[in-house]
Amino acid sequence: MVNLDEYVKDIFNKMDEDEENMKKLNIMTIGKTGTGKSTLINAIFGEEIVETGVGKPVTQNLKKIELAGNPVSIYDTRGIELDSEGQKEARDEIVREIKKRADLDDSDERIHIIWYCINAGSNRIEEYEIELIEKLQSIAPVIIVLTQSLGKEAVEFAKYIKSEDIKYDGLITVLAKDYQLGGMEIKAHGLKDLANMTYNMLEEGVRRSFINAQRVDLEKKEEISTEYVKKAIKASAVVGITPIPFSDAGVLVPLQTMMLGKITTAYGLHKEDIVKTVLSGVIGMGGTTIIGRGIVSNALKFIPGGNIVGSAISGSTAGIVTGALGYSYIKVLNYIAKENNAGRKVSNDIIVSLMKKYFEENSSKGKLLLKGLGIKEDESMDELPDIDEKDQ
């Protein structure tokens, strides 16, 4: 028998395992002083990573910034705006370091992508910058990020760069945080586009690390989490090939724990109290609640017909219950993330009420969910999908 506290601990144990298996993602940021690199990094990763992270010098002009529990390291450069001779030395040192790392077998040491930051307000890209960008682009993907992009001038500057014969992999205009101009507020923009462009350029081995760490592209977190739910639904249906006695509903717990652990990993949520509050919306806060039976009995209140054979749970019912739990969990985590990104806290009462609402809705439409996955009512899949496979 598993109670709520144990259930949450099991979810976080799965999350810890998942994060330990993640490859380290290394992002290099390059740009003159004043381009807003720190603001950009903090905006993408949702915390003061530059201020609170541990910075270690790698070379004279390169510093590695790490944050405990975060699978992303930032390699921040400096010195490219020195005098011409100093610029060349700084550029050569940066290029040498990236080349050296590119030749290593260990992916954790390679630079996986480079954000080359230029202040859009400068409306200028120097010749030495073009030369550096092209050298870098021959080693790793380079995205030119036009920071502090406030309007038409930034758009025109982007058009100019695109019209030049410069080798790079992507270009994006970004305003990392809201900006007051006169009496008008210009909203932050471009962050989600940068995150999406970065994700698409990364090798598969480090994509999950980026999804875990970034905070601006919630749709990608939801998309990846949804795939875990689909696999868990199919796996639950297999478990119910022979109808499960209601008293043995706990056999679904390991599958659901793994599913929720992977979703929690995708959202980068490290707060057990929040997860406990979310799940209490389905199974209550009682410390002695028996999780498997608690989740199933709550779902059966909303599944048309209950879909029970005698006192047993069919494969389709097992799939519906797992799907309702997974999809509802995603919806609530998404809501919490959006509110937190906007600087707002969400009360426990709202979290509980949302989880109840979504769980009821998803349970009641569960047969449509099964149909979309090719599972017929009261039939099961022939093969157990592996929801622990290393995908994305």
Image (cartoon, rainbow, N blue to C red):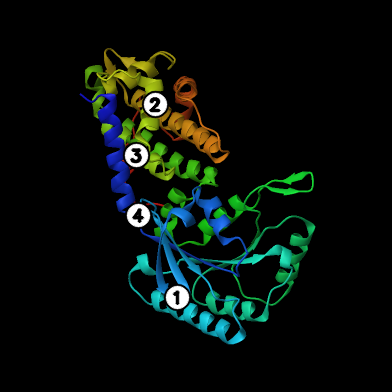
Which of marks 3 and 4 precedes in the sequence? Answer: 4
The residue under the point 57% across, 81% down is: 87
Which of marks 3 and 1 precedes in the sequence? Answer: 1
Q: Mark 4 points at which residue?
A: 22
Say which mark, if any, is on residue 277. Answer: 2
Residue 18: image location, x then y, percent: 32, 48
- Whether residue 10 sits left or right of residue 131 in the image: it is left
Disc 2 residue type (three-letter):
Thr
- Structural distance between the alpha carbons of marks 2 and 3: 15 Å
Which of marks 1 and 4 precedes in the sequence? Answer: 4
Which of marks 2 and 1 precedes in the sequence? Answer: 1
The residue under the point 60% across, 68% down is: 33
- Structural distance between the alpha carbons of marks 1 and 2: 45 Å
Asked if the residue under mark 2 is in contact with the one under mark 4, i.e. CB atoms within 8 Å, the reply is no
Dot 1 surroundings within 10 Å: few (below 14), some, or many (20 or more)? some
Disc 1 residue type (three-letter):
Ile
Disc 4 residue type (three-letter):
Met
